Amino acid sequence: MSRITAVWLFMVGIVLSSCSVSKHLPAGESLYMGAEVKVVADSAVSAKDAKAVKEMVEPLIRPVPNSSLLGFPYKVWFYYFMGEPTKEKSFRGWFRKRFGEPPVLASRRAVTANGEIVTNYLQNEGYFRTEASGELVEKGRTAKAHYTVALKPRYLIENVEFVDPSTGRGFTQEFLKNRQSSLLKSGQPYQLSVIEAERQRIERDLKRVGFYYFRPDYLIIKADTNLNRNRVNLYVELKPNTTQLALKRYFIKNVYVISDNGLLRSDTLAGAVYRRGFQIVDPARAYRVRTFADAIGFRPKAMYSSDIQDVSLSRLINLKNFKFVKNRFELLPRSDSALLDVYYYLTPLKKKSLRAELSAVTKSNNLTGSQLNLTWMNRNLFRGAEMLRLTANAGIDVQLGSQRNIKVRDYYRTSVEGELSFPRFVLPFYRMNPAKNQTLPKTTLTVGYEELSQKDFYTQTSVKLNWGYMWRRSTRIEHSFTPISLNIVKPRNISEALVDSITSPTIPLQDLLRYFSILENRLILGAQYNFSFTPQPAFGSRGKFVLNAGADIAGNVAGLISKGRQEVGLVFGIPYEQYARFDVDMRYYYDFTPSIRWANRLLGGVGIPYGNSFALPQFKQYFAGGSNGIRAFRGRAVGPGSYQPDSLSLFGFTSFGDIRLEANTELRFKVNQYIETALFADAGNIWMYRNFDNSFYFPEDNAVFTNKFYKQVAVGAGLGLRLTLPFLLLRFDLATPLRKPWLPETDRWVIRQMDFGSRSWRKENLVLNIAVGYSF
């Protein structure tokens, strides 16, 4: 410790000891310093249960004491440090509010109330004969609460019985069916929270089958604890005063759709037009009837179902045509009626919109880029909620500053794209069943053209055409299938400077590979399939699992229509790509507490080139590193295998591969609603699927995937900061490599070489990633 630090600590100690906060407290009051909880357990209670009870009880104690450091309430000291502010907006007022904290005073009444709260809480958790008490122990002008919990054994559920309500066949039958899916299980602890969840579950199940007016309040679950061995019997019963409305199964009479709620008047419904079972109020004829018929699951004479109610609202919202969507049900005015009218009130969004976006980015190869995006959208092109989106982009990447690399040339990008999506399957002889599909399927047609130019070198053009479908059979499973995916890439405006660069004997291998991929005419004709699955977590579970998988197959159809037996297959005179690519993305999230989350991701991918292709097409290849990958390495700066990327190439880091394996883990700490910190570690790499004899594709064997792949894994770790802004989450990740796969095998772990005090080490090894949104 330096002399200056010691002097400062000595002076602070003198100030703090001489300026006690106690003299500022109101007369007769004591500063509350917190609480201690002691659990006195019955001999039948295990030490593990006693510890768990203590951990459950401690967060219940109120009030929360002032913040302290080594037992000193420093925020209270700051609160009184500058005296009472004369004005709320003065510097004193700001200082007190920003750094100070008003004193939390001890209260015997609060101690008594806490004892009752703890007792009730534990009894609701099944500790029926448990009691808690507390006392306030004062010492000078401070006080501490001491609580004692006399813990008795926890009661377990012995039997669960659904009592026959004898209300008529329909309701009784559906009510008794709930036994099969009950949350109350024999052998589980008695918990009031589970009982409340069971009442709500029964309500949901009954509303699914027509009982619109049923509520959880109509149920009572009785507990019989007149048993030995700390067991309890539960009886699920219908309250005797339950209204007859709740015991009826309801059916739909009329379905009203008001397409513009802003024009609603007292005589609006008088202008309703009956079409395909709907009473539609759409004076402007903005929508075809099929739009509502596909989205709304109710029909006249159909049984009411809360599932259909929820799904219909979700579908209408997902049409992205309406600013507000709401509905209501109205009982027909007859004493014995079991019929409901359903009303849908829609408030449309503007049909057409134009949006402009300007973005900027700094890349690892010293290029600074900017891009302008213009998007025009029509939300209801053919009166069926078909969405047309036209996008035009223009961008440039240039070198700025004094340290310019004359080898790196500026880039220019322009593109136009049109996307037309239909909220239905566009297929012959297909009609959607609105009662079965959880969400509306989507058919999408995408057409695009792009030009990428490197100054004084070349221009690469790309044309794409995609036709695909997306659908869900449930809210947990999503499918997407693109049977037609066409991409044609052609170069033009090849300059002599580029030819001279390629023929130069000193050109880096990576640049040569990149230029060969640029100069070739390529055609990709294939199909893709993607699958997403998010299983329903068990009741009370803190974990969440997500699975995404996909397949991309190209070249089979092109091979069939290719003519002749050429060494390189051609379609329309253009070589076509042949490959099969498979990907999987598994994620698992676990919430230790509401403010601490453990996030994990495992990525796997393999691309198998065959026939016409030596490797995957450039934009289908994998790369490692960057803000969404192994964050301790810059983008495309890892692999393949133990190959060392060349950052001085004409393109910066340009590593690519046919195979990817990557694992990420991150512990996230939520400080408040705006700030989150994180600790993370990433590991992985990319590899080539194979090498070819006499080819220039990474001739060294260290780039190919083998059974020793684990020796070539890159590892990094770091710290993260996330700022939650009103419209986005801004992420900062500072990371450093722990293992570099391109070093000699015995020297790849570099933890011992860490030297945060060295400027050159920091420049080479500390990587700051700035991105929007979570990486996973």
Image (cartoon, rainbow, N blue to C red):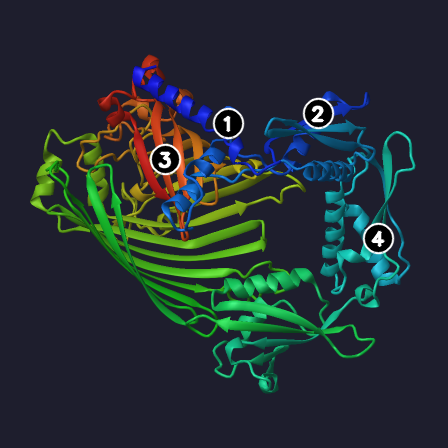
Q: Secondary structure at mark 3?
A: strand
Q: Quadrant of residue 483?
A: bottom left
Whichever of labels 3 and 2 marks the residue nearer the N terminus, that label is 2
Q: Secondary structure at mark 4?
A: helix
Residue that carries the numbered disc 1 in the rendered image: 72
Residue that carries the numbered disc 2 in the rendered image: 38
Whichever of labels 1 and 3 marks the residue nearer the N terminus, that label is 1
Disc 1 from disc 4: Cα separation: 61 Å
Q: Are marks 4 and 3 in contact (CB under 8 Å)?
A: no
The label shown at residue 176 is 4
Q: Amino acid at mark 3?
A: Asp
Disc 3 from disc 2: Cα separation: 42 Å
Residue 772 x %, y %:
37, 45
| In the foreground, 482 or 562 | 482
Rendered view: 774 above or below 283: above
Q: Amino acid at mark 1?
A: Phe
Which of labels 4 and 3 is toward the front? 3
Whichever of labels 1 and 4 marks the residue nearer the N terminus, that label is 1
Q: Amino acid at mark 2?
A: Lys
Disc 1: CA contacts within 10 A as few (<14), some (14-19) or many (>=20):
some
Which of labels 2 and 1 is toward the front? 1
Disc 2 from disc 4: Cα separation: 45 Å
Q: Amino acid at mark 4?
A: Leu
Whichever of labels 4 and 3 marks the residue nearer the N terminus, that label is 4
Whichever of labels 2 and 4 marks the residue nearer the N terminus, that label is 2
Residue 617 at least partly seen: yes
